Amino acid sequence: MTTRTVVHGPDLSVELSLVAERLALASPAGAGDVGRTGRPLLVAGMDEVGRGALAGPVSVGVVVAALPDAGPQPAVRDSKVLSAKRREALVPEILAWGAAAAVGHAEPGEIDRYGISAALALAGRRAWHRVATDLGRIPDALVLDGRDNWLPRSPLQASVGLAPGPGAVHLQVKADATCATVAAASILAKVERDGLMTGLAEAFPDYGWEGNKGYGAAVHRQAILDRGPSPYHRMSWNLGLSRGQESTPVWPQRPEQGREQGLQQGEWTA
């Protein structure tokens, strides 16, 4: 007799526990109102991609589930264990399942200006703003991957006009492997950022971005030494360049304002 091992993927257990906590903390009248009106509680999952890349944006995905009944869940997994084809196939399922979903970006100039942690928070706040706008309300809670709540570190001058952040943040280690909303967010962020880097590779073909997506692969690092940095490289990072090369990129710079305005709208085009 053959015994099969059942591998369980991410589910909504953590998200539903947050719903239970919210209802337990609510007044009896408030809990009754939830039951009578059928108004769901909105729990979001958030995850990032591109933190360690040498070029391109840092991107943050957010997916919101309307609980307690979010409907049939897509077969999401941590984006890193899925093939590119499978990730892309899951995108329409995730968008149909989630109450709202978005990906926010912070561009290399913002990473250089504010630092990676603040730029990561800015990308997250941009994604959060988009889902809050689409929903017409702030989600009730957020599940964030890891041990560190980096979302409040968004630079004030770049966050003007964005929706307020979440009131309740639940930190969950390995959330992209256990929490359905976070796994879904990781897939959206990965697919969108990979697409942006593949598009940029057509304009800047020397760096191999269609394959390495801006990370420090050997072919990418060698091209930086041979060709110099592009406008999409993070100049504050160790690119292995001499001081003269760091200060004088070979490629012409794009207008900074236009790049940042496009990213705030979730766009990134070469």
Image (spheres, rainbow, N blue to C red):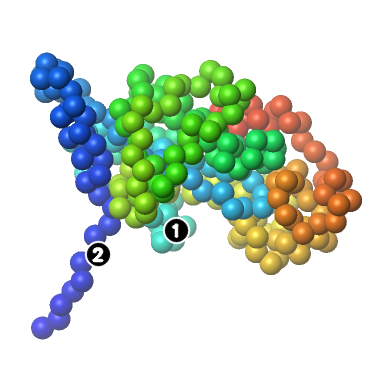
The kind of secondary structure element at disc 2 is loop
Determine which residue is flagged by label 1: 80
Q: Residue at x 41, y 48 (%)?
A: 146
Type of the residue with mark 1: Lys
Quadrant position of residue 113: top right
| Nearer to the camera, 78 or 191 | 78
The kind of secondary structure element at disc 1 is helix
Q: Residue at x 73, y 46 (%)?
A: 236
Q: Residue at x 15, y 29 (%)?
A: 24
Graded by Cα atoms within 10 Å as few (under 14), some (14 to 19) or many (20 or more), the crowding at tag 1 reads some
Image disc number at residue 7: 2
User: Residue 119 placed where, x, y %?
Assistant: 59, 37
Quadrant position of residue 132: top left
Q: Residue at x 56, y 49 (%)?
A: 50
Q: Residue furthest bottom?
A: 1
User: Residue 200 placed where, x, y %?
Assistant: 67, 47
Q: For the residues marked 2 and 1, what is the alpha-carbon distance in whole angstroms?
A: 16 Å
Graded by Cα atoms within 10 Å as few (under 14), some (14 to 19) or many (20 or more), the crowding at tag 2 reads few
Q: Answer left or right for 252 relative to 80.
A: right
Type of the residue with mark 2: Val
For the N terminus, the quadrant is: bottom left
